Amino acid sequence: MRVITYGTFDLFHEGHRRLLERARALGDHLVVGVTTQQYDDGRGKLNVRQPLMDRVRSVEATGLVDEVILEEYEGQKISDIQRLGIDIFAIGSDWAGKFDYLNDYCRVVYLDRTKGISSTQLRDESAGLSIGVVGSGRIARRFVQEARFVSGVDVESVYSRTLANARRFADELELASVHDSYEDLLAAVDAVYIASPHGHHYEQARTAIEAGRHVLCEKPIALTTAEAEDLFARAKAADVVLLEALKTAFLPGFQRMVGVARSGSIGDIRAVEATFTKLVHGGRELAGPEGGSISELASYPLLAIVKLLGTEPDRLATRTIDNGSVDVFARIDLDYPHAIASATTGLGVKSEGDLVVAGTNGYVYVSAPWWLTEYFEARYEDPSRNRKFYYKLEGDGLRYEVAEFASMIRDGSRESFRLRPEESIAIAGMIERARTGSTSFA
Ligand code: C2G
């Protein structure tokens, strides 16, 4: 029987070795396809550290492999299987279901992935960064799936307030350990990703920082300036990374849009209008005291405004429509010295989610959903000068913030220019002012 498997095999570890061992045991000839940098770029695998030849050498050094080939393009697996006369395609169970289409060409076997690599290995340079997940909701699930596309990151543990929720989450996502004590989770990991309800962010981030853990915290990192300032000051004193998981900030397309708008190509920026609305029907997002369209969604439009116009507006005024307990629609107006901006949010109210940056020579237009920036245009009075920009966005965009967080920890940097502490603090302050000082309509 001839068996084939594929992988990046970056920073070769015990999980990789066991996978190869079991793949080898399925037959008598094992072929391993090692992914090239270009292929990994194409499929959105981020932060691969080792050059191709080093990764090939680690695979060969196991002595388990009869033949190594390179995986260079999408669709190659089908031709490899036929060309090499393969009987069995084997791959880790994190890919369960994804390669069923190969059943037309050979037998497909999903082998259980090895759980808890980070804890079974000496914590040295080659060990991954172990991130514990706080919370077991929808965003936490997407985070775990996206983090698997970031090399050098192991997400193996989850903390949830009820053990049953943590168990369900860990079973579904094949995580090694569950915790119903936050302290136990902190003791088991290098860093945490906080995806609990907003009202818990501050306490949980503070506790993690005090325990010397790096923190990636869902937006909004805090609902007041004071809390945001306090957290960043504590992170600095403890020499740990504290990063707000405001995914748009880390997207290549969004960064380029800000670069184009601020480069002078549209002249001086005079106005920014950004909208984010989402249809929900009840649930935690629509319940007080922490819910509402501003706390749920304003981080995104305020990010665009802060990146384009800075952290210090002269004035902020908000009008909202309430459902009796929280705001369901809001328009936050900000005045800057030479520009004005508005951030519009809606929960259970739908509008066009686009972004317009008006300048003295032209404007930038980002169509909905602008916060997943894949495409934008610079437009001018003379349309023949218009330019279109395209950027590929992999997955749902979460992997870019994971990659940034992991790189910061690895490189010892404590601040990211993509989302600086002052910017997160300013956004928290704007959210606080918008929520407390709004003129409301029922
Ligand atoms: N693996 C494992 N246990 C782990 C980590 C990884 O069993 N703790 C397995 C993966 O499931 C995969 C192999 O080791 O089968 C290689 O993993 P990666 O290098 O992360 O490669 P991957 O991104 O899974 O690429 O075409 C490429 C393939 O899609 C696999």
Image: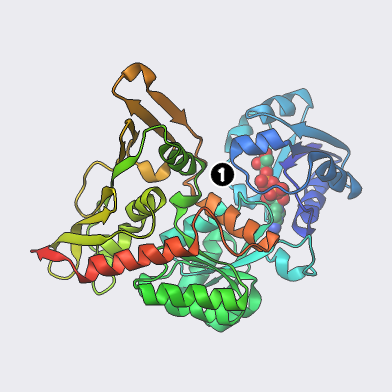
Task: Name the residue tied to disc 1.
Answer: 97
Q: Is residue 15 left or right of residue 164?
A: right
Q: Give x and y (percent) for residue 198.
A: 37, 70
Specify the color scheme: rainbow
Q: Is residue 291 visible?
A: no
Q: Residue at x 35, y 41 (%)?
A: 369
Q: Indicate the secondary structure of the residue bearing disc 1.
A: loop
Q: Is residue 260 left or right of residue 157?
A: left
Which one is in front, 272 or 173?
272
Q: How many marks?
A: 1
Farthest left residue? 442
Q: Quadrant of residue 362?
A: top left
Q: Residue at x 89, y 50 (%)?
A: 62
Q: Amino acid at mark 1?
A: Gly
Q: Give x and y (percent) for residue 37.
A: 71, 37
Which one is in front, 257 or 149?
257
Q: Give x and y (percent) for residue 65.
A: 87, 42
Q: Is residue 125 above or below residue 211?
A: above
Q: Is residue 319 left or right of residue 229?
A: left
Q: Would you say the beta carbon of the disc 1 residue lies within 8 angstroms of ligand 1?
A: no
Q: Quadrant of residue 33?
A: top right
Farthest top residue? 384
**How packed is label 1: few (under 14 Cα within 10 Å), some, or many (20 or more)?**
few
